Image (cartoon, rainbow, N blue to C red):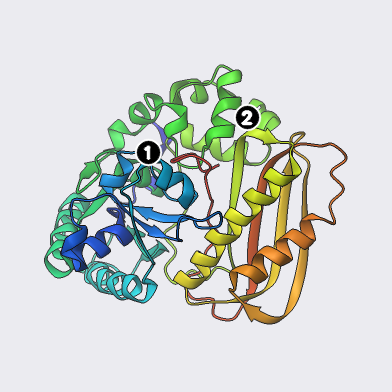
């Protein structure tokens, strides 16, 4: 039996992911939006970014982090709605009250996503899947919104399970099925393996979890650095991370890995504006502002640099973020080098509750 199913690893973890959360709240509160392609986010100009897309919009290939102008080009009848983060936070708080009826070990990943450790639970319910069903039913009854849940023995597997049957689904990965599940998974479906890393793995002959499992720890760390150890563990269906309630993060940020390295300076600056717009949305979502802005650049040769500037005042103003990031970018000597990743993060936060560093994927599901 695999290590993942030893006593040490036999946690009962639920990952709850609300279905198209922001967009679903807007459709719930505005009957005229129901059944129509809708996005929550900035207006369709060069700086607007999609924060969330309804399932009707996703049929057109529209997804979060996509420039609004690109989304509109895919669906001319698309409805744009400005985010109401105060409402989303209220609904999220309702959902967390439900979680706390079952366990205090709740780790909020975002307003619409959380991990729960129900190994020991307040209701003394023996099966995590039963708890997940109760939670889904209570969320629907109290908020009129649907959630998808994944249940398994660790956070990685629970996260992967919740992505198997959306929307309004429930997937359980039992201990005895964990390794087979991972082995059969396409590498690009792994949480945390993005478009660029998946392409590199393909070039190494790694296409499935089984292929990844066949590689040694030394080989993975040689090719992928420190994160190679994480890939080695998850290929064995192992994840030792505990659910951490009340975890306080110290920055809000976003980054994009590019499937094709950027060599045009104007395109780099355009992408930087898109990332800045997404960071501004996340700051607003978390009701916080930051003073220290950090620019992250990774070149095609994998060399990574950062540049930081501390502002005189706390901010979440988009123009300030763009201006500061652009000024930092212009201090970097490119020397005809191409860029594979850009990122912006705000730290030194005014209010650190439930803030997080997030990844901004270039393509849906391609976070790296």
Question: Would you place residue 36 above or below residue 195 in this image?
Answer: below
Q: CA distance from mark 2 to mark 1?
A: 33 Å
Mark 1: give few (<14), some (14-19) or many (20+) Cα within 10 Å: some
Name which of mark 2 and mark 1 comes first in the sequence: 1
Is 65 on the left or on the right of 153, as rendered?
Answer: right
Toward the viewer: 157 or 124? 157
Question: Is any part of residue 307 visible from this angle?
Answer: no
Q: Position of residue 217 (x, y in %)?
A: 61, 30
Q: How many marks?
A: 2
* Residue at the image position 21 percent from the left and 45 percent from the top: 170
Q: Position of residue 116 (x, y in %)?
A: 32, 60
Question: Would you place residue 46 above or below residue 5 in this image?
Answer: below
Residue carrying label 1: 61
* Residue at the image position 47 percent from the left and 37 percent from the top: 234
Question: Is any part of residue 295 visible from this angle?
Answer: yes
Which of the 4 quarters of the picture holds residue 326?
Answer: bottom right
* Residue at the image position 26 percent from the left and 67 percent from the top: 99
Q: Position of residue 246 (x, y in %)?
A: 44, 72
Label 1 secondary element: loop
Q: Position of residue 348 (x, y in %)?
A: 66, 75
Q: Which mark is residue 220?
A: 2
Toward the viewer: 77 or 130? 77
- Label 2 or label 1, whichever lies nearer to me, is 1
Toward the viewer: 215 or 4? 215
Question: Would you place residue 330 above or below residue 214 in this image?
Answer: below
Label 2 secondary element: helix
């Amino acid at each position: 039996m695999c290590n993942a199913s030893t006593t040490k690893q036999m946690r009962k973890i639920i990952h709850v992911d609300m279905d198209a959360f922001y967009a679903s709240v807007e459709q719930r509160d505005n009957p005229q939006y129901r059944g129509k392609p809708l996005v929550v986010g900035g207006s369709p100009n060069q700086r607007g970014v999609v924060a969330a897309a309804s399932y009707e919009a996703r049929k057109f290939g529209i997804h979060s982090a996509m420039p609004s102008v690109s989304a509109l080009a895919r669906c001319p009848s698309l409805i744009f709605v400005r985010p109401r983060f105060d409402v989303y936070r209220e609904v999220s708080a309702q959902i967390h009250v439900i979680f706390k009826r079952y366990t205090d070990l709740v780790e909020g990943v975002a307003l619409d996503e959380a991990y729960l450790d129900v190994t020991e639970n307040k209701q003394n319910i023996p099966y995590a899947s039963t708890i997940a069903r109760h939670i889904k039913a209570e969320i629907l009854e109290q908020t009129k919104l649907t959630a998808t849940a994944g249940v398994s023995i660790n956070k990685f597997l629970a996260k992967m399970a919740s992505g198997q049957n959306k929307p309004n689904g429930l997937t359980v990965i039992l201990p005895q099925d964990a390794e087979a599940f991972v082995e059969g998974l396409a590498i690009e479906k792994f949480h945390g393996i993005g478009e660029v890393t998946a392409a590199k793995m393909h070039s190494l002959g790694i296409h499935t979890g089984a292929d990844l499992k066949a590689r040694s720890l030394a080989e993975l760390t040689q090719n992928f650095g420190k994160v190679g150890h994480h890939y080695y563990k998850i290929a064995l269906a192992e994840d030792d991370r505990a659910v951490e309630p009340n975890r306080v993060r110290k920055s809000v940020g976003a980054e994009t890995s590019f499937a094709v390295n950027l060599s045009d300076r104007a395109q780099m600056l355009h992408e930087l504006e898109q990332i800045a717009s997404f960071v501004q949305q996340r700051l607003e979502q978390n009701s916080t502002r930051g003073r220290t802005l950090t620019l992250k650049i990774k070149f095609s040769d994998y060399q990574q640099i950062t540049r930081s500037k501390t502002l005189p005042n706390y901010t979440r103003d988009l123009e300030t973020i763009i201006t500061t990031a652009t000024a930092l970018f212009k201090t970097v000597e490119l020397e005809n080098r191409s860029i594979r990743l850009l990122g912006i993060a705000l730290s030194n936060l005014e209010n650190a509750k439930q803030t997080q560093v997030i990844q901004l994927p270039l393509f849906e599901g391609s976070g790296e």
